[in-house]
Image (spheres, coloured by chain):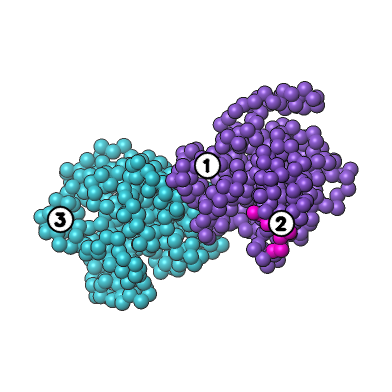
Chain colours: A cyan, B purple
């Protein structure tokens, strides 16, 4: 599944990818084939209020920072105000961000590998969803369609409708879905939700940041054995990791619904260097989960996201991704 | 903390301990000093109906099997009918077993290292508890006093009364208590219970079989930071591991209140060799927990118990203990 596609990209000039020793994995083909062992890096687009010039500076700086990392693809999140889901006070104020589709189209043209664009479909009308889907190049873009944050939230388009629109408007565009181990801890049926999404066309699944290794293993295990019972090939599960430099960021992750085990919270709270402690924890958790997936034969990808705008945290995320990529078997 | 005590024991004849390359750790002194890195092996006494001759055969076979292992001490459980705690049907019928104190006194005279005798104090009158406690040699015996299985159970002696009797009747007899990570998962206060027991004299704590690594780490972490805040030295936490060769044994562990993560249950259920799978899982969980305790500086011991009477499971338990002892730093 190695590809020489990067040669043609490099031929366009200005690309330093050929300096990397690991061949470019064609992410989309790999996912379509149900294969894992790939690395993604996830970004949140700049704030909505960012002017065009500044947005381009941010994009250029991001591309420059990520090029040496050589991830197999990018993820662009679609940030939604989830306050309808959680009545508790939001630890950070909600800041609307640019539409990830616009950010990709207007500012990330120089990026060489596939981009997974999230769509919080409840934000958009069915017409908007359809027109965006039809305009995407399925050799360059994938999408993760995300339903409304809560059942009571007013959704302009439901997840089921968006999935149907994807099948009609751009059937070769590879869609992914979200996988939530925390929901599995509470309801024991997340593996069945994944299989229902797979029936609706999903080819991969992406988790929130994983802190609760046990919950993630439970989901992997139930998904694996259910796929086996139904004689269905498992789709790659993409596990997200990040670093967390402060208790406030941890509170925010909790607010978003991430289960953070007590011992991890304690260790971060008492660490002389919480960022380094969280880096080491993410590394250990990812290592365990990769080993577990390989034992079962469940394909997986790794996604590293930067949840903060602090320079030192962004750099630690990139360092985490660099370290994790050395552990992927490609 | 190494000792040459075994030389005098060996001088009594018939002992093969001097063949072992690792020096005998004086378990009681080590525990009194708040030091860990020791190995215990836990036994359930034979059934109450066993005749004297057969009980001696069982004891002799056990001693012969455990001698090459050279554990730093034995644990003898005091089996109680816990059906008052759990209204669900017991997967195995309750079989009353010999009083561990009697089994030790009558059949295990040949055992060379300290023995931790459990006392389910609710079963005994205060006079029985007092007279047993006063008769014990504190250089040879330790005890774990266990309260009634449920608050509604009629207890002849309460745990608090038994602790007070121990202080009066035999103040140098090192007492331990039980530590239940599962209770910490539900109530978040097990670390405070441990500290209260420590106030009452406890010098070590022993868990049930650990399957839920996360729950155990949460307890270790909260206990560690609370000790630090109170400037109290932590007492050794003894983590119990075992092998489990069948789903029925797993059901029984669950019935006893052990949290078995879903992925472990799935793996055992689908394993070609569940016993080997559970051996590997116990090894992995113990390794993680030992590393975590060392990072925090919490002293720990390892206890391996055999929960089954099947020969192959007993042998696998001994093999597990042998493997884990190589990982202890003594």
- Give the Cα separation between the discs numbered 1 and 2: 28 Å
Q: Are marks 3 and 1 in contact (CB under 8 Å)?
A: no
Magenta stretch, residue numbers: B153-160
Q: Position of residue A92 (x, y in %)?
A: 27, 60
Towards the viewer: A108 or B215: B215
* Residue on which the image places disc 2: B157
| Chain letter belonging to callout 1 | B
A302 relative to B152, above or below: above
Residue A64 position by quadrant: top left
Q: Position of residue B81 (x, y in %)?
A: 73, 59
Q: Residue at x 79, y 55 (%)?
A: B96
Q: Secondary structure at mark 2?
A: loop
Q: Looking at the image, is mark 1 or mark 2 nearer the viewer?
A: 2
- Left or right: A322 in relation to B278: left
* Residue on which the image places disc 1: B234
The quarter of the image holding the C terminus of chain B is: top right
Q: Position of residue A137 (x, y in %)?
A: 25, 60
Towards the viewer: A169 or B253: B253
Which is more N-terminal, label 2 or label 1? 2
State yes or no: residue A254 in magenta. Answer: no
* Residue on which the image places disc 3: A55
Q: Position of residue B304 (x, y in %)?
A: 65, 43
């Amino acid at each position: 599944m190695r590809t020489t596609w990067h040669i043609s990209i490099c031929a366009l000039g200005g690309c330093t990818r050929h300096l990397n020793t690991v061949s470019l994995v064609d992410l989309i083909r790999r996912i379509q084939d149900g294969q894992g062992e790939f690395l993604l890096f996830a970004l949140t687009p700049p704030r909505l209020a960012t002017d065009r010039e500044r947005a381009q500076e941010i994009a250029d700086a991001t591309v420059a920072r990520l090029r040496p990392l050589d991830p197999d693809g990018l993820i662009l999140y679609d940030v939604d105000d989830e306050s309808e889901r959680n009545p508790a006070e939001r630890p950070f104020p909600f800041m609307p961000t640019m539409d990830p589709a616009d950010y990709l189209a207007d500012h990330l043209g120089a990026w060489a590998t596939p981009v997974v664009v999230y769509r919080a479909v409840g934000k958009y009308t069915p017409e908007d969803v359809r027109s965006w889907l039809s305009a995407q190049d399925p050799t360059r873009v994938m999408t993760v369609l995300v339903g409304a944050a809560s059942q009571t939230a007013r959704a302009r388009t439901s997840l089921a409708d968006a999935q149907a629109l994807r099948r009609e408007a751009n059937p070769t565009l590879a869609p992914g879905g979200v996988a939530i181990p925390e929901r599995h801890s509470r309801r024991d049926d997340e593996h069945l939700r994944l299989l229902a999404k797979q029936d609706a066309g999903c080819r991969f699944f992406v988790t929130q940041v994983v802190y609760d290794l046990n919950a993630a293993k439970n989901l992997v295990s139930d998904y694996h054995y259910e796929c086996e019972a139904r004689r269905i090939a498992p789709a790659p599960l993409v596990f997200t990791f990040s670093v967390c430099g402060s208790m406030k960021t941890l509170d925010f992750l909790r607010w978003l619904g991430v289960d953070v085990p007590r011992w991890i919270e304690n260790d971060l709270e008492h660490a002389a260097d919480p960022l380094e402690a969280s880096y080491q924890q993410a590394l250990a958790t990812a290592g365990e989960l990769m080993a577990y997936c390989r034992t079962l034969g469940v394909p997986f990808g790794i996604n590293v996201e930067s949840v903060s705008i602090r320079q030192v945290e962004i750099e630690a995320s990139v360092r985490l991704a660099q370290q994790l990529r050395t552990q992927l078997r490609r």
